[in-house]
Image (cartoon, grey):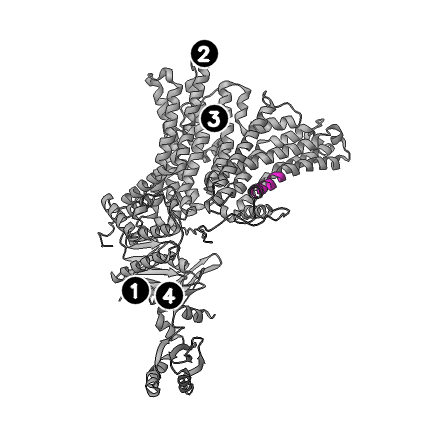
C-alpha cells in the first residue's frame, strides 16, 4: 500500500463525534431498531383505540388530557422507557463484550471515555426521537378536537421534557451497570421493576432514593383522582428545579463512573 | 537498532490461572514470529502489547511510551484479532469505513484507504455484501484489511492465516514480507510452525505462559547444546562415509536412513562436523547428492525446548 | 464422493434409546445452575411454596397461634381457594417468568448465535428430541415450583391433620393440581422457547420474555380503563392464567369472561410457538 498521510490527531470532542456517527449508523441498520421503533409507537395505537372506542360510544373525548397524563404517560414512564432504555443502556458496553468487538474500539486512537459517551449520545438520540415521537403523536390523536388550542401544548412539552430526562438518567445508570456486570440486564430489571416500582411509594426521604421520584415530581399535576391515582400515590414531591438538577447530576455521575470503569477494567472476552 | 516494542517482567494472571509469566523482551523492526501451541499465552501477550489487558506485573512500552490507555499510540498500531467477530447487519465496506473513520480521516481519505485495503486483500468485489454472508476466509481477510488500512508502522497479527486457503495464505505472507521491506514492525502469532518459517527467522517461542527462546531460529537451534544435531547425507558410498565418521569424537552415532544411499549422523558439534565433511569427501572421492539437517527447523527446536 | 459441506444431517440409523433428549436437558440444567444470580432467583421463587407450606401447618395448629390472632375462628383454611391463590399470586407468576428468563433465554438463541444447530443434527438426534431436550430444562424448574408444591400441600395437610378429610371433601383436587401445573409448565416452556428462537441475541430475548409478559398486563390495564369490559382481560397473559386457575379449582373467576376463551388464547400461543419453532429450526440447511 502506498503510504498516505498518517492518522490525524483528534481532540476528545472529535473522537467522541466519530464514535457517535459510527454507532448512530450501525444502530439504524440493526433489525432490532425497527422492532423498537414499532414498540415505541404503542402509545399511538392506544390513543387511536381510545378515540375509536369513544367514537363508537357516540361522544367526544372529554378526558383526553387526563387519559394522556395518567394512562399513556404512566405506560411510557413506568414500562416503555424502562424497557427500551434498559436494552440500549446495557448494550453500550455489553454488546461489545458479548459480540467480542471491543478490541476494534480499544485499539483505535479514541479515548475509552469517548467510546462510552459517543455510544451513549447515539443511543440517546434514538430513544429520545422514538419515544417522544410516539408521545407527541398519541397526544395529537387524543386531542384531535382541540389541536388548534395552543394552551394544551405547554403540558405536552412538559411531558416531553420529563421523558427526555428519564431517558438521560436511566440510560446513564444502565450504562454504568453494563460496565460493571455481565448480568446487567437482570440487575436492571430488578432495579426498574423492583426497586423503582416499590421504593418510590415509601414515605419520607426513602422515596428520594429512586429516579422515578424526581421524574414524577416534574409531572404537571400531583393531585389525581380515579383508578389511576396510584401514579402519584404517596408522592412527596421535590421542587421542580431541584428535581431537574438531581436528574442531571445523576446522569453526569453515572456517566463519569461508567467512563472510569470502562477505562480501567479488564474485559475478558469469551473464547470459542 | 532501538527496540520498537519492549516488555519488562510482563506477567498476567486470570484469577489463579497464569496467562503470561515474567516476559522481558524487545521487538525490533521486521517480522517477529510468536510461536506456541494453543493456550501458550500468545493472545495474552498480544492483548497486553495492544493495551487491551492490564499487566498484573511489569510493563509494556511502544517507542518508550506506556501502552495502556495511551490511545494516541494507536494511530500507528494495527491489530488483527484472533476472534471472528464483526458488528451485526453491516457490509464489508460499511465495517471498514466505520473503523477508518475512528482514526479521524475525512470521508475522501476514508474511502480511498478502504478501497486500497480491500484491493490488498482481494475483497473489493464483495465489499457491498453483508459480512454475515462472507466465508471464513473472507472474514479473515476483512480483519486483516481493518488492521492495515490506516497504514500503521506497527502491525500485530494474531493468527492471521486462520481460515485462509493455501493461495490466500501465500498472498498474506507476501503482503507481510512487503511490510517488512518498508521498515515496519510486525508481530505474527501462529501455532502452525511452517507458516512462521515461511515469513521470518526471528522468533519468540512461548509455552505455558513462559518464553522458551527468542532470536534467530538457527541461532536458537545452535544454542541448544544438550541436543545433538542430526545431519543426513545422500551419497554414492554411504558405508564408506559412515566408516570414516565413526572414529570422530564429535560424532555420537551413525545410522543408515530410510531413504536409499543415505547416512544419518548425530553430532554434538555441528561446526566441526561441517568443517570436516568437505575434506573427507575430497579425500575419499565420495559423490554427494544431498546434505540436509532434518532437525534444523522450528518444529525440532520447539520439541527440544518443550522437552517432547 | 466429494462432499462440499462441513456438517451433514445424520444419515445413520436412529437406534431406539430411552431418553435421547436427556443429554440436552442435563447440559441445560448444568449451565443454568452455573450462574450465581440464577441460584438466588431460584431460591427466591421457592419462597411462596414455603410460605404456603407453613400455612398448611398453621391451619392444623390454630391453638398455638390463637394468642397471636386473638381468638379468630379460622386463620387459614386449606381448601381449593388456598391452592388457587398459590397458583395465581403475582409473585409466583413473576418468578416463573424470571426463571424462564435466566434458564431459557439462551436455550435456542445461543445455538443460533454459535451456529450449533448443525452440531446437534449431525448426530442421531431428531427435531423432537432437540425440542424435548430444551423444554426439559424449563419443565424441571416449572414443575418444581408448580406440581411439587401442590402435591406437597396435599400430602402435608393429610399428615398434619391425620386424616383424609381434604381428599374426601375435594376428591378432584389432586387432578386439578396436576392440570394447573401442566398448563403453567407447557405454556411457559413454549412461550420461552418461542421467544428464544426469534433472535440470536440472548439479552434481547431476555427483554422479550419479561417485556411481553408485563406489557400484556399493562395493556390490559389501559384497555380495561378505556372500555370497562371484562374481555380486556384476555389481552393479559397473567389474567388468562388466573382465569383458567379459577376454573380448575372450581372458583369464581376474577373477570366475567368465560375461562374457555382464556384457555383458547393460551392454547393459541402454544400452537403458534410450535409452528414457529418448527419453521425456525428448519431454516438450518442440515436439518431435515
**In-front residue for pair B220/B18:** B220
**In-front residue for pair C230/A158:** C230
| Image x and y of residue C205, in percent | 48, 38
In the picture as drawn, the residue positioned furthest to the right comes out as C163
Compute the Cα span from label 1 to label 3: 67 Å
- Between disc 3 and disc 4, the foreground one is 4
- The residue under the point 47% across, 54% down is C1
Figure check: A76 above or below A103: above
* Element assignment for label 2: loop
Mark 1 touches mark 3? (CB < 8 Å):
no
Chain letter for the residue marked with disc 1 in the picture? B
Q: Can residue A246 be seen from the camera position used here?
A: no
Q: Is residue C143 magenta?
A: yes
Compute the Cα span from label 1 to label 2: 85 Å
Place residue B132 in its image quadrant.
top left
The disc, 4 or 1, on the residue closer to the chain's N-terminal end is 1
Amino acid at each position: 500500500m502506498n503510504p498516505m498521510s498518517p492518522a490525524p490527531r483528534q481532540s476528545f470532542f472529535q473522537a467522541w463525534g466519530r464514535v457517535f456517527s459510527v454507532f448512530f449508523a450501525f444502530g439504524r441498520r440493526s433489525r432490532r431498531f425497527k422492532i423498537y421503533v414499532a414498540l415505541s409507537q404503542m402509545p399511538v395505537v392506544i390513543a387511536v383505540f381510545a378515540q375509536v372506542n369513544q367514537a363508537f360510544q357516540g361522544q367526544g373525548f372529554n378526558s383526553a388530557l387526563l387519559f394522556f397524563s395518567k394512562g399513556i404517560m404512566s405506560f411510557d414512564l413506568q414500562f416503555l422507557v424502562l424497557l427500551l432504555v434498559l436494552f440500549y443502556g446495557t448494550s453500550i458496553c455489553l454488546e461489545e463484550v458479548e459480540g467480542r468487538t471491543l478490541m476494534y474500539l480499544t485499539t483505535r486512537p479514541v479515548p475509552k471515555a469517548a467510546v462510552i459517551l459517543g455510544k451513549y449520545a447515539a443511543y440517546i438520540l434514538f430513544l429520545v426521537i422514538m419515544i417522544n415521537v410516539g408521545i407527541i403523536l398519541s397526544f395529537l390523536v387524543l386531542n384531535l378536537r382541540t389541536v388548534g388550542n395552543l394552551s394544551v401544548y405547554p403540558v405536552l412539552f412538559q411531558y416531553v421534557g420529563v421523558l427526555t430526562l428519564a431517558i438521560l438518567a436511566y440510560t446513564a445508570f444502565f450504562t454504568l451497570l453494563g460496565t460493571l456486570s455481565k448480568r446487567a440486564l437482570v440487575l436492571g430489571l430488578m432495579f426498574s421493576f423492583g426497586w423503582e416500582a416499590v421504593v418510590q411509594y415509601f414515605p419520607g426521604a426513602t422515596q428520594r432514593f429512586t429516579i422515578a421520584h424526581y421524574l414524577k415530581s416534574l409531572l404537571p399535576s400531583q393531585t389525581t383522582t380515579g383508578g389511576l391515582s396510584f401514579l402519584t400515590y404517596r408522592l412527596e414531591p421535590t421542587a421542580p428545579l431541584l428535581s431537574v438538577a438531581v436528574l442531571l447530576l445523576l446522569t453526569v455521575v453515572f456517566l463519569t463512573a461508567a467512563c472510569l470503569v470502562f477505562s480501567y477494567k479488564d474485559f475478558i472476552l469469551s473464547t470459542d | 537498532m532501538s527496540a520498537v516494542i519492549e516488555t519488562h517482567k510482563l506477567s498476567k494472571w486470570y484469577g489463579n490461572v497464569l496467562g503470561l509469566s515474567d516476559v522481558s523482551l524487545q521487538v525490533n523492526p521486521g517480522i517477529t514470529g510468536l510461536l506456541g501451541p494453543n493456550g501458550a499465552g500468545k493472545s495474552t501477550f498480544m492483548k497486553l502489547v495492544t493495551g487491551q489487558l492490564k499487566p498484573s506485573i511489569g510493563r509494556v512500552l511502544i517507542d518508550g511510551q506506556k501502552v495502556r490507555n495511551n490511545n494516541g499510540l494507536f494511530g500507528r498500531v494495527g491489530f488483527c484479532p484472533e476472534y471472528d467477530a464483526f458488528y451485526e447487519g453491516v457490509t464489508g465496506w460499511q465495517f471498514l469505513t466505520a473503523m477508518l473513520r475512528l482514526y479521524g480521516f475525512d470521508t475522501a481519505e476514508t474511502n480511498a484507504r478502504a478501497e486500497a485495503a480491500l484491493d490488498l486483500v482481494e475483497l473489493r468485489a464483495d465489499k457491498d455484501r453483508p459480512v454475515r454472508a462472507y466465508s471464513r476466509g473472507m472474514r479473515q481477510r476483512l480483519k486483516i484489511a481493518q488492521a492495515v488500512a490506516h497504514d500503521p508502522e506497527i502491525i500485530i497479527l494474531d493468527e492471521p492465516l486462520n481460515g485462509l486457503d493455501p493461495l490466500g495464505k501465500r498472498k498474506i505472507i507476501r503482503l507481510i514480507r512487503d511490510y517488512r521491506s518498508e521498515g515496519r514492525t510486525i508481530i505474527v502469532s501462529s501455532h502452525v510452525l511452517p507458516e512462521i518459517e515461511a515469513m521470518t527467522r526471528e522468533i519468540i517461542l512461548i509455552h505455558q505462559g513462559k518464553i522458551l527462546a527468542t532470536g534467530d531460529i538457527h541461532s536458537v537451534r545452535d544454542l541448544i547444546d544438550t541436543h545433538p544435531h542430526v545431519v543426513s547425507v545422500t551419497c554414492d558410498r554411504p558405508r564408506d562415509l559412515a566408516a570414516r565418521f565413526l572414529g570422530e569424537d564429535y560424532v555420537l552415532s551413525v545410522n543408515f536412513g530410510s531413504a536409499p544411499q543415505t547416512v544419518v549422523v548425530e553430532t554434538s558439534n555441528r561446526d566441526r562436523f561441517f568443517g570436516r565433511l568437505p575434506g573427507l569427501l575430497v579425500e575419499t572421492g565420495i559423490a554427494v547428492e544431498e546434505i540436509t539437517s532434518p532437525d534444523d527447523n522450528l518444529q525440532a527446536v520447539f520439541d527440544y525446548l518443550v522437552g517432547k | 464422493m466429494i462432499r462440499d459441506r462441513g456438517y451433514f444431517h445424520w444419515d445413520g440409523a436412529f437406534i431406539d434409546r430411552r431418553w435421547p433428549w436427556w443429554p440436552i436437558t442435563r447440559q441445560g440444567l448444568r449451565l443454568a445452575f452455573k450462574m450465581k444470580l440464577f441460584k438466588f432467583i431460584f431460591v427466591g421463587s421457592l419462597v411462596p411454596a414455603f410460605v404456603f407450606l407453613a400455612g398448611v401447618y398453621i391451619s392444623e395448629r390454630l391453638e398455638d397461634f390463637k394468642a397471636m390472632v386473638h381468638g379468630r375462628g379460622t386463620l387459614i383454611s386449606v381448601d381449593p381457594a388456598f391452592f388457587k391463590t398459590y397458583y395465581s399470586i403475582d409473585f409466583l407468576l413473576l418468578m416463573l417468568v424470571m426463571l424462564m428468563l435466566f434458564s431459557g433465554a439462551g436455550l435456542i438463541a445461543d445455538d443460533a448465535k454459535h451456529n450449533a444447530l448443525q452440531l446437534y443434527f449431525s448426530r442421531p438426534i431428531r427435531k423432537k428430541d432437540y425440542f424435548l431436550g430444551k423444554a426439559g430444562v424449563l419443565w424441571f424448574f416449572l414443575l418444581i415450583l408448580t406440581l411439587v408444591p401442590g402435591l406437597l400441600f396435599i400430602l402435608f395437610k393429610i399428615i398434619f391433620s391425620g386424616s383424609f378429610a381434604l381428599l374426601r371433601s375435594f376428591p378432584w383436587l389432586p387432578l386439578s393440581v396436576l392440570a394447573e401445573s401442566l398448563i403453567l409448565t407447557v405454556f411457559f416452556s413454549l412461550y420461552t422457547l418461542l421467544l428464544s428462537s426469534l433472535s440470536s441475541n440472548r439479552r434481547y430475548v431476555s427483554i422479550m420474555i419479561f417485556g411481553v409478559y408485563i406489557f400484556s398486563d399493562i395493556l390490559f390495564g389501559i384497555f380495561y380503563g378505556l372500555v370497562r369490559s371484562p374481555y380486556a382481560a384476555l389481552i393479559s397473559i397473567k389474567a388468562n392464567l388466573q382465569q383458567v386457575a379459577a376454573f380448575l379449582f372450581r372458583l369464581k373467576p376474577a373477570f366475567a369472561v368465560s375461562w374457555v376463551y382464556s384457555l383458547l388464547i393460551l392454547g393459541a400461543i402454544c400452537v403458534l410457538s410450535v409452528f414457529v419453532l418448527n419453521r425456525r429450526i428448519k431454516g438450518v440447511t442440515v436439518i431435515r
